[in-house]
Image (tube, rainbow, N blue to C red):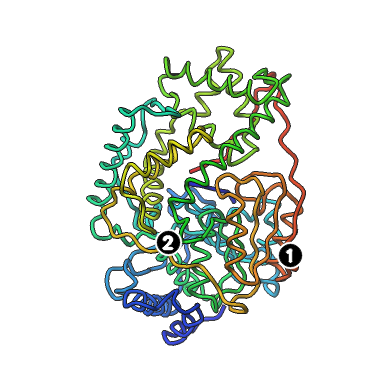
């Protein structure tokens, strides 16, 4: 389920940290020796972080951040059951609130999802108009979660291997192709185990939630104000379950379904099905603008144009770099963000007319980003594989994905191959925590969701609201952009700002009309909107 979106008081004592954990529902935490030890270890680490704080200074050049953003580190245990054992450092970025000191409300911590994504860039949001009201009231804090970037980086293979040459991506793979992908998945899982060793098991969502509490303490915040997008909503929900008394305000933007039965195998199947509908949304928009793109007057004809491009790239990759797999990866972004639709449609139209340059620019692998991409994939794989049991019988994967691909061919097998290493994982796998909070345990929390989101399908937001008592859901109707807070919908942003600035929420649910779809780009224009970075 790889999905990405853009965008106190000191003195916490060990005993108070342990008593806060007692507010979680019986049976969810603390019912076995390991969970009790990790709870105690988190309280120890938080108390230590409160005393140490974070020393912020100039950011290392590789971060590429402006001088106004400062960076530091916070130390966390590799294993919370052994808080006095090996420590790792998480990198943190920070920008002071831009408003009057008297109006400052503390730190707002942001996580963009992944797993495997970093929010080190987040303090730069002070310059983005939609974020200025929040930047005036809050210090904006980003960080690289464990395993990501310079935060005890995880790797599973040589980055040069990860920067693939043009590859096939059959929507109905042959038995020979399946055997090849099984072998690759086994090799990748073995590489993760070999390179990380016993530490591999420590890269998981529960530890990400514990790390978040240590970061809260290091910032000197008695209670956390947090906004998580996509996967960030899942470990944010784990945090709310583990540490309900530490929550001030929390925003869950594009929510993962936290049902333990869905983590993560079921969620990935649901995601593949949802992408088929969103892929159709893109084709319908292209057909609506056929006078601009000439790819077909209905969505079926646009699909035929895409399949023509896929067939040509199978025979002859574009620029010796873009084959069917690169094409599919690039056009998957159309399922995440509709602001890339004009660039995607333009590149496809030009390619079919004999000009491959826009498509190569859109879809060719970025060799300079190979190391970063390999790291992101390694963390994604480790977290999802460690979080929950996965089917270990290939026949289950084969039957489920073969059946699903008949209904949803666009993303199904690509998603399966991404996650298949979990079938052969060599680290112990956890049982997912039952995300659930009692009535009154949490202050009101805010859930944002687009009705046609493919990466985190809408039923997940309904399930999260059911499990977090007192939460409020704001829905962008008939829209599918993934990650809507601080985006192009002013109605959504009003609810977001009102909540984070005042704590006010709608009674239980509210809805917003969809943001406008993008305007088509004339084929005569040469300056095109660029797709956002995506993991």
Is 231 on the left or on the right of 130, as rendered?
Answer: left
Of the pair 280 and 292, the residue shown nearer to us: 280
Q: Secondary structure at mark 1?
A: helix
Q: Which residue is mark 2?
A: 205
Mark positioned earlier in the residue sequence (2 or 1): 2
Q: Picture coordinates of residue 351 (x, y %)?
A: 55, 17
Q: Nearer the viewer, mark 2 or mark 1?
A: 2
Above or below — where is 360 with respect to 270? above
Above or below — where is 428 with respect to 114? below
What's the mark number on residue 498?
A: 1
Q: Which residue extends farthest bottom?
A: 15
Crowd tier of the residue under label 1, counting other residues whose Cα lies within 10 Å: few below 14, some 14–19, many 20 or above? some
> Which residue is painted at 44% across and 85% down in the image?
13
Numbered-mark total: 2
Above or below — where is 30 with respect to 488? below
Quarter of the image holding residue 420?
top left
Q: Secondary structure at mark 2?
A: helix
Is 170 on the left or on the right of 498, as rendered?
Answer: left
Question: Can residue 127 be seen at all in this image of the molecule?
Answer: no
> Which residue is painted at 49% across and 62% down in the image?
235
Of the pair 255 and 492, the residue shown nearer to us: 255
Crowd tier of the residue under label 2, counting other residues whose Cα lies within 10 Å: few below 14, some 14–19, many 20 or above? many
Distance CA(mark 2)–CA(mark 1):
29 Å
Above or below — where is 301 with respect to 245? above
Question: Can residue 32 be seen at all in this image of the molecule?
Answer: yes
Quarter of the image holding residue 295?
top right
Q: Picture coordinates of residue 216 (x, y %)?
A: 50, 71
> Which residue is painted at 53% across and 17% down in the image?
308
Q: Picture coordinates of residue 479 (x, y %)?
A: 69, 44
Of the pair 199 and 128, the residue shown nearer to us: 199
């Amino acid at each position: 389920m790889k999905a990405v979106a853009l965008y106190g008081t000191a003195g916490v004592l060990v005993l108070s940290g342990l008593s806060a954990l007692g507010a979680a529902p019986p049976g969810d935490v603390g019912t076995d020796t390991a969970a009790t030890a990790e709870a105690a270890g988190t309280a120890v680490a938080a108390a230590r972080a409160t005393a140490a704080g974070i020393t912020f200074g100039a950011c290392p050049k590789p971060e590429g951040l402006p001088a106004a953003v400062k960076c530091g580190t916070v130390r966390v245990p590799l294993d919370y059951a052994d808080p006095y054992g090996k420590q790792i450092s998480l990198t943190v970025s920070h920008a002071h609130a831009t408003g009057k000191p008297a109006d400052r409300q503390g730190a707002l911590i942001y996580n963009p999802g992944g797993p495997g994504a970093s929010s080190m860039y987040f303090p730069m949001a002070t310059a983005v108009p939609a974020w200025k009201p929040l930047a005036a009231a809050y210090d904006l804090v980003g960080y690289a979660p464990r395993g990501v970037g310079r935060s005890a980086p995880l790797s599973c293979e040589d980055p040069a291997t990860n920067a693939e040459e043009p590859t096939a991506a059959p929507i109905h793979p042959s038995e020979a192709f399946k055997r090849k992908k099984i072998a690759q998945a086994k090799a990748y899982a073995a590489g993760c185990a070999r390179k990380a060793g016993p530490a591999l098991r420590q890269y998981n969502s529960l530890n990400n939630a514990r790390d978040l509490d240590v970061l809260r303490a290091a910032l000197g915040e008695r209670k956390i104000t947090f906004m998580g997008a996509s996967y960030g909503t899942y470990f944010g929900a784990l945090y709310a379950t583990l540490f309900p008394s530490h929550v001030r305000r929390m925003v869950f933007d594009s929510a993962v379904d936290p049902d333990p039965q869905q983590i993560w195998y079921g969620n990935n199947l649901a995601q593949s099905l949802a992408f088929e509908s969103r892929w159709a949304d893109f084709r319908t928009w292209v057909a609506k603008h056929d006078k601009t793109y000439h790819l077909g007057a209905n969505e079926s004809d646009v699909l035929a144009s895409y399949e023509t491009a896929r067939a040509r790239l199978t025979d002859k990759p574009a620029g010796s770099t873009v084959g069917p797999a690169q094409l599919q990866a690039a056009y998957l972004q159309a399922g995440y963000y509709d602001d890339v639709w004009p660039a995607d449609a333009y590149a496809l139209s030009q390619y079919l007319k004999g000009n491959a340059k826009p498509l190569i620019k859109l879809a060719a692998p970025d060799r300079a980003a190979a190391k970063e991409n390999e790291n992101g994939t390694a963390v994604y794989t480790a977290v999802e594989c460690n979080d929950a049991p996965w089917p270990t019988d290939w026949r289950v994967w084969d039957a489920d994905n073969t059946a699903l691909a008949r209904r949803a061919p666009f993303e199904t097998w690509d998603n399966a191959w991404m996650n298949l290493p979990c079938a052969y994982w060599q680290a112990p796998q956890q049982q997912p925590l039952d995300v659930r909070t009692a009535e009154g345990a949490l202050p009101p929390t805010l859930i944002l969701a687009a009705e046609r989101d493919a990466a985190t399908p809408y039923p997940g937001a309904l399930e999260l609201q059911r499990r977090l008592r007192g939460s409020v859901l704001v829905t962008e109707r008939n829209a599918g952009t993934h990650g809507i807070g601080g985006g192009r919908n002013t109605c959504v942003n009003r609810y977001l700002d009102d909540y984070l600035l005042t704590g006010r929420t709608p009674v239980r649910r509210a809805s917003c009309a969809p943001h406008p779809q993008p305007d088509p780009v004339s084929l005569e224009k040469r300056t095109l909107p660029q797709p956002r970075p995506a993991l």
